[in-house]
Image (cartoon, coloured by chain):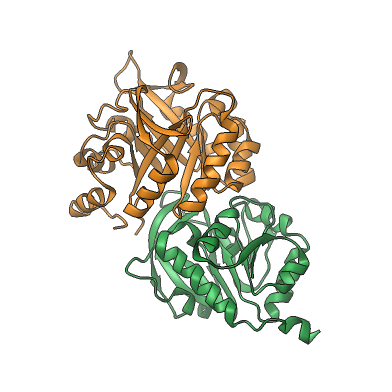
Chain colours: A orange, B green
Amino acid sequence: MLTKRIIPCLDVKDGRVVKGVNFLNLRDAGDPVELGARYSREGADELVFLDITATIRRKKTIVDLVREVARNVFIPFTVGGGICDADQIDLLLRSGAEKVSVNTAAVDNPDIIKEAAQRVGNQCVVLAIDARRSQKSSEKWQVCVEAGSKPTELDVIEWAQQAEQMGAGEILLTSMDADGTRAGYDNALNHAVSSAVNIPVIASGGAGKLEHLYDAISTGGADAVLMASITHFGDVNIKQIKQYLAGRGVCVNL
Amino acid sequence: MIIVIDYSVGNVKSVCNAFEHLGVEAALSNEPEQIRNSAGLVLPGVAAFGYAMDALGDLAELICEQVAAGKPLLGICVGHQLLFEQSAEHGAHKGLGLIKGKVIPLPRTQRIPHMGWNSVQFAGYWPLFEDLGRSRYFYFAHSYYAQVDDRQAQILYTDYGFELPCAVRKNNITGVQFHPEKSGPQGLSVLKNFAKMCQKYPKGTLNDRK
């Protein structure tokens, strides 16, 4: 049986892993290659590297990072952050990434999803969505772009469905309201999206304790759970997470 | 030297990285001479079937010729699917035809792509899957799969709402739908077993026959 995946997320800024609260107040969490290798040894199912460097230099550094990670880590990893065309996606895959995530560029030009999927296969194209609860309705979420700084008119559920039709192979769904708070995932959001599409959904933002991960899978219907704060700073390790979930009847690769 | 066939699609580098980590001599190449002189061939692949087959071009014939002479071949993911006769991915495409069967879409009763770690069950014996250790989990990422007509060729299957065939072998040819290069220690042991198999392949056999 297919297992639920446990995915640590490494936000990388200027070559270091950082983690903030609600996308702000960044704190250093170590070297990306070392931390990635540690997670791989501990039994993580996959890794996500998001380059949040705000400079033009990142294009080169991200390729170097992917090459270095790929030489040291033998589990799948996704890379994202500022990817803007199919050529870049191709280059990152050729450098050793298993999947590439797109966010702002796909909102600006949805054809990037179609073009990339036709070239490299749907399974390599991840649509990252930064979702914020709408102030008008509690059961609606709006898509935000440019690292969450810019709200758009797009509805998260409709956008997820459109991306699936265009060839996205997976959705990395981050709740901006929950991110870094450690108060639990937004499971109304997770459930709304995971039941609206037939591609896997990774729940992200808000993990603070083991119970939250279970809730994202059982209540939120997530296929995978992403976390950063709780594992980066040593509160729990991957094995403890998997043992806990297995104890509650979740199928995991332990 | 094992040659990982470089036909310009997707993540082919990771297979080389895994061999390097294992201390196995391997290189990425599309040079016919290097392919002829290799101890074994890996056909990787992350792309659509038609695109991959086109990208392979003239190398297709060379691979078939090498395999017919007994050289070990390992197909991974789309490389595994290319071993079959045909595919229905984005139109009808002819494959290498080394193993009987066809590539068809996964049933839409489950999420597509089949993405993540799934455990494999044995349908037959093949030394490539020896000494896997405790875990039987491998990493999958695909929307199409090879329906195997040659039942004797089927070695592994996995449960994805049905018995999904995920490894085949015929003589010196092996194909795996999952990614051994991305499946942690058990994936690396499959690649290590493949390297052992290549060591046994007598060097120069092809040249002698000519």
Furthest residue toward right: B210
Q: Is residue B82 above or below residue B12?
A: below
* Among the 4 quarters of the image, the one containing residue A234: top left
**Residue drawn at point x = 64 percent, y = 70 percent:** B1
Q: Is residue B163 visible?
A: no
Q: Is residue B56 left or right of residue A64?
A: right
Q: Is residue B51 left or right of residue B139?
A: right
Residue B97 image offset from top left, x and y in percent: 67, 71
**From the image, which quarter does the N terminus of chain A lie in?**
bottom left
Residue A96 image offset from top left, x and y in percent: 55, 49
**Residue drawn at point x = 65 percent, y = 84 percent:** B202
**Residue drawn at point x = 35 percent, y = 34 percent:** A29
Q: Is residue B41 left or right of residue B145?
A: right
Nearer to the camera, B48 or B14: B14
* Among the 4 quarters of the image, the one containing residue A26: top left
**From the image, which quarter does the C terminus of chain A lie in?**
bottom left
Q: Is residue B132 above or below residue A136?
A: below
Q: Is residue B2 visible?
A: yes
**Residue drawn at point x = 55 percent, y = 46 percent:** A67
Nearer to the camera, A250 or A254: A254
Residue B75 image offset from top left, x and y in percent: 59, 66
* Among the 4 quarters of the image, the one containing residue B169: bottom right
